[in-house]
Image (cartoon, grey):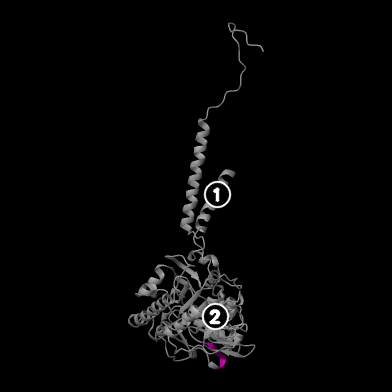
Amino acid sequence: MSTMYFMLTFFFSGIVTCHGSKSAYNAVPQLLLVSFDGFRADYLKNYKLPHLQEFIKDGVLVKHVSNAFITKTFPNHYSIVTGLYEESHGIVANKMYDADTKKKFSPPHDLDPFWWNEATPIWITNQQQESRTSAAAMWPGTDVKINNMTSHFFMKYNVSVSFVERMEKIVTWLNSSNPPVSFATLYWEEPDASGHKYGPEDIENMHKVLEQVDDHIGFLVAKLKAFGLWDNINIIITSDHGMTQCSREKIIKLDKCIGRDNYTLVDTTPVAAILPRSNKTYVYNLLKNCSTHMKVYLKEDIPDRFHYHHNNRIQPIILVADEGWTIAQNDPIIRLGDHGYDNALSSMHPFLAAHGPAFTKGYKQNTINIVDIYPMMCHILGLKPQPNNGTFSNTKCLLADQWCVSLPEAIGIVIGVLMVLTTLTCLLIIMKNRVPTPRPFSRLQLQDDDDDPLIG
């Protein structure tokens, strides 16, 4: 048994040594994080996106990123850069109310650090460790003094600034800033804006906007190559959420169920946050029977899988519409596409693609969690991560300096090792049986006609 253990140890140590010989990414790293808001995962297979596909060919692709509940813009962008669920980083919705301070939050113009200080995003950690420099083009929170610090270089949010202007600013900072930028973020509002306007099932219009997004990726790659950055920089392209189709036939009208004087609507469809003005149980009971297409939760009863309990900014009652349904008080302006729904729905999932020396070439993976992106980015940058909800091992196969074996490969290796050891054991047994058994020593017997033995 000890021989078999030794041989197994030797075999696997040889594999590790072999994989460890891959050229590790040891140079001073640069990382660019890009988000195209509302880029639903299956847009990749439903539309021709040649620049993005070329980007993926020599990099990695995660087909579905399981994002955080609620599946809205500000919460998930903060989960990407903190590795925390919304209940932990404090940006629990696009619109919030804090009962203790009576403060209200509404994007994109709320720069009060109060809302952001419950977590430390990666651009701050990057600057606090080893005096590095971060830059940002309109990523949510980058122009806020979080823990009394902003990103060293940043653009104040302005929806009228084009993608090309944002991209050129970021590339300039990456190329020639002093001190040099090691981490940068770039945000663009599409295809989210068009997804709301037309709905993801409007193939003609979504094709046009996704073609533009793909061209933006082509411009970005060309610019990085022109500045001589392409071969050394690591780029992650991802999104915050997906999009689903809605219609005027799928509306839940709260006014039919409860008077407005009984509650305050803090955040709206498809996850509505309710602050009761009267008895909470009374309000809950009225809402619970309002529609079969809406789930109604007391805060303490929200399913654990949502990770959406432990924050004062989560309101006492939460309404969650079924996919494609809209919650309204009466007659709303209906968006033909929306997001925010249950994060288990594939329509809510974005994707992740990455390219650069830190990443494996030509590798595809089915899924990771959105909170897993943060520890992976910290690893690439050589940063000590802040406490987070992510799992680094979920992203190991994406990284060039990590040993990764899939389950089928691992099973194959174990079976192969066992077969080799079994064969060796059988050979040893066979060889042992073929060696003649030595006879015991016997004293020489002299016959009567032998000469006398020589006596010295």
Quadrant position of the C terminus in the picture: top right
Q: What element carries label 1?
A: helix
Circles 1, 2 touching at the beta carbon (< 8 Å): no
Q: Residue at horizontal 37%, vertical 74%? A: 51
Identify the residue position indicated by label 2 in the image: 178
Place of residue 173 in the rendered image (x, y in percent of width and height, measured from the top left)? 50, 81
Boundaries of the magenta span: 261-267
Q: Residue at horizontal 50%, vertical 30%? A: 434
Q: Residue at horizontal 53%, vertical 92%? A: 260
Which amino acid type is shown beneath numbered disc 1?
A: Phe
- Answer above or below: position of 112 versus 33: below
Q: Is residue 336 a member of the stretch shown in magenta?
A: no
Which amino acid type is shown beneath numbered disc 2?
A: Asn
Give the residue at the far right of this rendering.
456
Q: Looking at the rendered structure, which numbered label has been put on residue 10? A: 1
- Answer above or below: position of 69 versus 113: above
Cα separation, mark 1 vs mark 2, equals 49 Å
Q: How crowded is mark 2: few (under 14 residues within 10 Å), some or many (20 or more)?
A: few
Give the residue at the far top of this rendering.
449
Decide which of 419, 103 is in the foreground and name it.
Answer: 419
Q: Could you say which quadrant of the image residue 212 lies in?
A: bottom left
Magenta span main SS: strand
Q: Which of marks 1 and 2 is nearer the N terminus?
A: 1
Asked if one can make out residue 1 in the rendered structure from this viewpoint, the answer is no
Asked if one can make out residue 32 in the rendered structure from this viewpoint, the answer is yes
Place of residue 80 in the rendered image (x, y in percent of width and height, measured from the top left)? 52, 76
Decide which of 31, 333 is in the foreground and name it.
Answer: 31
Q: Taking 224 as reference, is 109 left or right? A: right
